[in-house]
Amino acid sequence: MQQILFRRTFVKIFRIIVLIHILFILPADLFSQNSYWVFFTDKKTVEFDPYKYFDAKAIQRRKELNLPLHDTTDLPVRNDYIIQIEKITGNVKSVSRWFNAVSVYASASEIRAIDKLDFVENIMPVSLTSKSSSYSSDFILSKPKMELLVKQTERLGGKIFEQYGIDGKGIRIAVFDGGFPKVDTHPVFKHIINEGRIIKTYDFVKKRENVYSGISHGTMVLSCIAGRYDTIKMGLATGAEFLLARTEKRSEPFSEEENWLAAVEWADRNGADIINSSLGYTYHRYFPSDMDGKTSLVARAANLAASKGILVVNAMGNDGNKNWEFLGTPADADSVLSVGGINPHTDYHIDFSSYGPTYDKRRKPNVSAFGEVIAAGRNKLLKLQGTSFSAPLISGFAACVKQLNPELTNKELFTEIEKSGNLYPYYDYAHGYGIPQASYFFKEQSKDSIEIIQFHLTNNILKVKINDQVDLENKGNENLLFYHIENNRKILDKYAIIKVFQHDVLEFPVEEFKNNELLRVHFRGYTGVYKF
C-alpha cells in the first residue's frame, strides 16, 4: 500500500477575496489624503548621458547583451511636470523614470485638479502594504540545527561549486528588504565587509545611504545568499558583490510598493546582475485575478528589469495554508524566477509555501529551495521559516551559475536553473521543477541503465510500476513518487506525491482521461510520460 502525502485537485482554483478588512484596518484620516501614482504623457526635451548616469557595470551588461545604452524608459522625468504636480499637492514622494510617473499624497480635490492637466495620462492609487515572506523563528541551540545549516546549501549541490572554486565572484546582487542591521559588524559578513564588496546602499524609507538599521529581515536574507559561519557557507554566493536597498518599514501603509519601484531602477543603474526580493503583495491590495503578471506595477517593473538583462528572483510567499493560498506579486511576473519552499525534513513542499499557477494559468513557482533554514539575526544565528529564505538560497545559486557561465543571458540563466531542478521535466504548482542542482552544470548526473518507470495497459486500466530491480526498502525520502495529470492546454488538473513501499504504485481507469491528456510520473530522477 502506498502512502499519499500530498494531493491537489483543481476544480475551481481561485476564490474571490473581499477586501472589506481594509475599511477597518486603515485609520480614518488616511481616507482624506491617499497615495497615488501620476503618469505623464511624454518626455520631450529631456537630455540624458548614459555614461554619466549608469555605473560601468550597467553599461557593460547592456553592451554584452546588445541592448541600447538607454531607451525611453531610462530618460529622466520632465522637471517642469514634477514642479506643477508639487504646486498642487505640496509633495512628490518618489519619481519613476521607467513609468514616467511620480507618487504623491493628495486629497480628492487635488487629484481632480491633477487630472485636468494636459500632460497627465493616468492616475492610479498606490498599493497598500507588502508582506515579507518570513514565517517564524527561534534561537539556534542544538546540533540538529547545525546540521540544517550545512544541508541548506548542500541540497543545492553546493559542495560541487566549492570544489571548482565557484562562489559568485564578480556577480553583483541587489537585495531589497526592510533593513540590514548589524551587517556592517556581524561576523558572518566579515569576509564581505573586509573585501569592500558592498558596493552601494540606499534606504528608500529614510532617503539616506545608511541601511544598517530597520527590520533585521534583510540581514537574515543576505546571510542566506552569502553568509559564512566559521567554515560553513550559509549561502552559496560568498564571493559576490552587493547592492543593499531598504524598501520596507513596519506599519507603513503606502510606501513599500513605490519603494520597490525606486529600488529596481536604482539597482539597474548601479549594475545589478541579480535582484533578490523576499517580498510580496497580496490581499492587502489585490484580488487573485490581479495575479496575472501584468496588473501590478511591481510585476511590470520586474519584467522591465528582465528586459534590461537582470535576473529577478522573488519569494512565492507564505499563504499556502491561509485563505489566500496563492502567490503574490511580483512573483506572478513572467520573467521573475519565483521560488517556493521545501521542507528539509520531508524533501517536499513545506505547508505554508504559496501555490501557483498565476491567474492566467502560467506555471509558478519555477523552482524551490529549503523553506526552513539557519540564518543570521542581529546577534545570534536563528532557525527561520519562510520562502523569504528559499529565494536568497536560489539567488546565491544563480550567482554561482552566472560566474561559471558568464556568456549566459539572464533569460538563458533563468531557463538553465529550471532545467537543473531535481524534478525536471516533471513540474507541479507546489514545487515547480524542484530544487536546482549544481551537478547539472558540470554534467555529473548519473542514471542507471534500467527503465525505472513502467506503464502497463490491461483491460482499460493503466498501471504504473516501479521496475522490480529497484530497491525500495528503507530508502526514506528517496521513495517519493511525484505525478501530475496535464490537460491539452498544458494546465495541471491534479498532482500528488506518494511514498512508495511496493513496485505496483498507481492504477488509473482509462475512461477517466480525455484525449491528449498526459500522465507524467517522476521517481528518483526519472520522468515517465503516458499520453491518452
Image: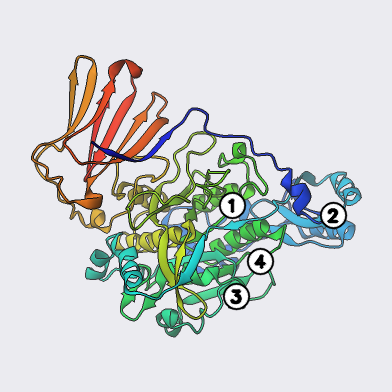
Q: Examine the image and state in which quarter residue 241 appears.
A: bottom left
Separation (CA) of disc 2 from disc 4: 20 Å
Compare marks 1 and 3 and give the one earlier in the sequence. Answer: 1
Q: Residue at x 72, y 53 (%)?
A: 101
Who is closer to the viewer here, 422 or 292? 422
Label 2, residues with CA under 10 Å away: few <14, some 14-19, many ≥20: few
| Callouts 1 and 3 close, C-beta under 8 Å | no
Question: Would you place residue 51 above or below residue 210 in this image?
Answer: above
The quadrant in which the N terminus is found is top left
Question: Would you place residue 316 above or below residue 174 in this image?
Answer: above
Question: Would you place residue 487 above or below residue 161 in this image?
Answer: above
Question: Would you place residue 121 above or below residue 302 in this image?
Answer: above
Camera sees residue 394: yes
Dot 3 falls on a residue whose secondary structure is loop
Compare marks 2 and 4 and give the one earlier in the sequence. Answer: 2
What's the amino acid at mark 3? Val
Dot 2 falls on a residue whose secondary structure is helix
* Mark carried by residue 249: 4
Compare marks 1 and 2 and give the one earlier in the sequence. Answer: 2
Compare marks 3 and 4 and give the one earlier in the sequence. Answer: 3
Of badges 3 and 4, nearer the viewer stands 4
Separation (CA) of disc 1 from disc 2: 42 Å
The residue tagged 3 is 211
Separation (CA) of disc 4 from disc 1: 32 Å
Q: Examine the image and state in which quarter residue 226 appears.
A: bottom left
Label 3, residues with CA under 10 Å away: few <14, some 14-19, many ≥20: many
Dot 1 falls on a residue whose secondary structure is loop
Residue 76 locus on image (x, y percent): 68, 59
Compare marks 2 and 3 and give the one earlier in the sequence. Answer: 2
The residue tagged 2 is 28
Of badges 4 and 1, nearer the viewer stands 4
